[in-house]
Image (cartoon, grey):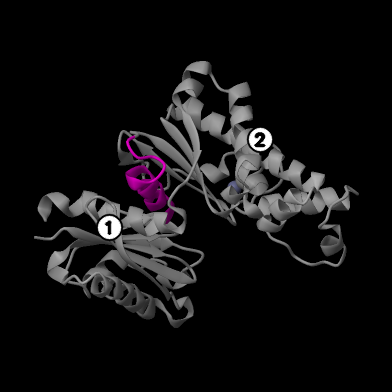
Amino acid sequence: MADYVIGIDLGGTFIKAGVVDKQGKSLARTSVETEVKKGHETVVTNICRAADIVRDEAGLSWHDIIGIGIGAPGTLDIKNGVVLLSPNLPCLNEMPLRQLVAEKVPVPVVLENDANAAAWGEKWVGAGRGVNSLVMFTLGTGIGGGIILDNRIWHGANDVAAEIGHMSVFAYGVKCACGNLGCIEAYASATGMIRRMKEAIQEGKPSLLAEKVKNGEEFLAKDIHDAALQGDKTAEEIIVETGRLLGVAATNMMHILNPDMIVFSGGMINAGDMLLHPIKEEVNKRAFPASREKCQIVFAELGGDAGFIGAAGCALTEFETSA
Ligand SMILES: [Zn+2]
């Protein structure tokens, strides 16, 4: 009897894959290059190769596998398994990805948005174990989102729900990459935080990163945290302000959805309490007590594995009854 699922986290640079059992435990994982520039056939071949590598490493045959879940970035038609528009994987635009993979493997395949899949992973075996509803903010170059309501991923009318990075927190704020004004992503993503740090330095605030800005050198969100740990007050202020703005966004989600939990994930959570405390402080100042008392605000637990674990979980949900 089939007892395992394979999850694929499809990124613009790497494909992460893993074999997961019905309890969400990972048995094997791998990472292969996506090779986007070689075109969609190569990408599909690489997805199947990654699946085969982890199946083999876990010592399983295809008869042991219930199905494959693929978490893909971009705008998708989930019901039909089609990638509509994916800026990081342009060779897959308008491609029936689910069908292309399913033709090459002997098990059924399900397609899911990558941020939704990661939220499902955290809900299944990560920070959100046991809760019914959660909202996940994934803090990276942009801010991704996943919404789970009553134990189901919320897809919306045509699969474009949970773009929570593009909620405006300033009505006439800076222009976001999406074209809208004042999106939380434009301020509190890694990119947004770096922009605000550069602006603070250009306004004359003292910082350990001032020399880099003067020389036109780039730095990362991690460098801001490192500077803050070395006593850079400006860097610390920028991180605290990032937390406050995320607290505003979290409050908005709490007032709309009344979730059990709000999870923050992505590399920026390495800033720890320096980021989490101001998020909570801002929520405590703003949110309705009834909503705030019920909602846990936490950091994600699965790190970079959330994507493939969640994608595998989506396959389990989709195919388990028919397996
Ligand atoms: Zn936006």
Circle 2 crowding by C-alpha within 10 Å: few under 14, some 14–19, many from 20 = many
Instruction: Residue 149: tell me if it is visible.
Output: yes
Residue 17 percent across, percent down from the top left: 35, 66
Q: How far apart are labels 2 and 1 at the CA level?
A: 40 Å
First along the sequence among labels 2 and 1: 1
Secondary element under disc 1, as helix, strand or loop, is loop
Give the residue furthest to the right: 204
Residue assigned mark 1: 80
Question: At 59% from the left edge and 31% from the top edge, which residue is drawn?
Answer: 280
| Of 228 and 95, the residue lying toward us | 228
Residue assigned mark 2: 244
Q: Based on the displayed image, in which of its 4 quarters is residue 59 positioned?
A: bottom left
Disc 1 marks a residue whose amino acid type is Asn
Classify 64 as above or below 229: below
Quadrant housing the N terminus: bottom left
Q: In the image, is 322 to the left or to the right of 99?
A: left
Question: At 48% from the left edge and 40% from the top edge, which residue is drawn?
Answer: 263
Instruction: Residue 77: tell me if it is visible.
Output: no
